[in-house]
Image (cartoon, rainbow, N blue to C red):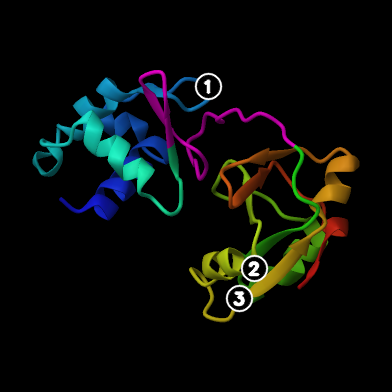
Amino acid sequence: MDILKLSREISYALRHAPWEYELELDNEGWVEIGQLLAGLHLNKQWESVDEQIIVNMIENSDKKRHEISNGKIRALYGHSTSEKILKTEATPPSILFHGTSRHLFERIMNEGLKPMARQYVHMSVDIHTAKMVGKRKDSNPILLKIQAGNASRDGVKFYQGNNLVWLADYVPSQYISIE
């Protein structure tokens, strides 16, 4: 079984199209593992997936996209569904990074960072991750430095996605510069 492909399938189900898998996410993005398995089993390719395979997938993942607790699973970040997944506010590191396309730089500096098609703005704790994210849309992305500590002290809300990813509803341009 291709575990990377399974991880992507589960991410798609939990982040973008829960209705396609007959999933009912709660307001924090959780769904019963049994419900997810039933949704996955609708596709012949995933008929043999069981809870232990999902647990192993999460435990062995580098990116930590999902978490399991009390018989439920959720995606930690990256949601694009219309119902916003609620996050608990947290204090971010003083500096975060965001990789973006060169053609968006002027707009970001005028309007700030907005979530666009996602529910939250995604930022990284390290330069490497931010560059990799930026390269998804631009072979030579711009790396932005976010003064997250200052923004947080001034009332911008941040939420921890996982150990590498931080989220915000919006980041005003005064906290953004080129790295």
x then y, percent, for residue 109: 80, 65
Left or right: where does residue 48 sit relative to residue 23?
left
Q: Amino acid at mark 1?
A: Asn
Left or right: where does residue 46 sit relative to residue 3?
left
SS label for mark 3? loop
The tag on residue 127 is 2
SS label for mark 2? helix
SS label for mark 1? loop
* Residue extent of the magenta highlight: 67-90
Question: Which of the pair 6/115 is nearer the observer?
Answer: 6
The residue that appears at 15% across and 40% down in the rendered structure is: 46
Q: Earlier in the sequence, mark 2 or mark 1?
A: 1
Mark 2–mark 3 Cα distance, whole angstroms, equals 12 Å
Query: Which class describes the residues within 10 Å of circle 2: few (<14), some (14-19), or many (20+)?
Result: some
Q: Which residue is mark 1?
A: 27
Mark 2–mark 1 Cα distance, whole angstroms, equals 31 Å
Q: Earlier in the sequence, mark 1 or mark 3?
A: 1
Q: Amino acid at mark 3?
A: Pro
Q: Quadrant of the C terminus?
A: bottom right
Query: Which class describes the residues within 10 Å of circle 3: few (<14), some (14-19), or many (20+)?
Result: many
Q: Are marks 1 and 3 in contact (CB under 8 Å)?
A: no
Question: Which of the pair 38/54 is nearer the observer?
Answer: 54
Q: Which residue is mark 3?
A: 141
Q: Comparing marks 2 and 3, which lies closer to the viewer?
A: 2
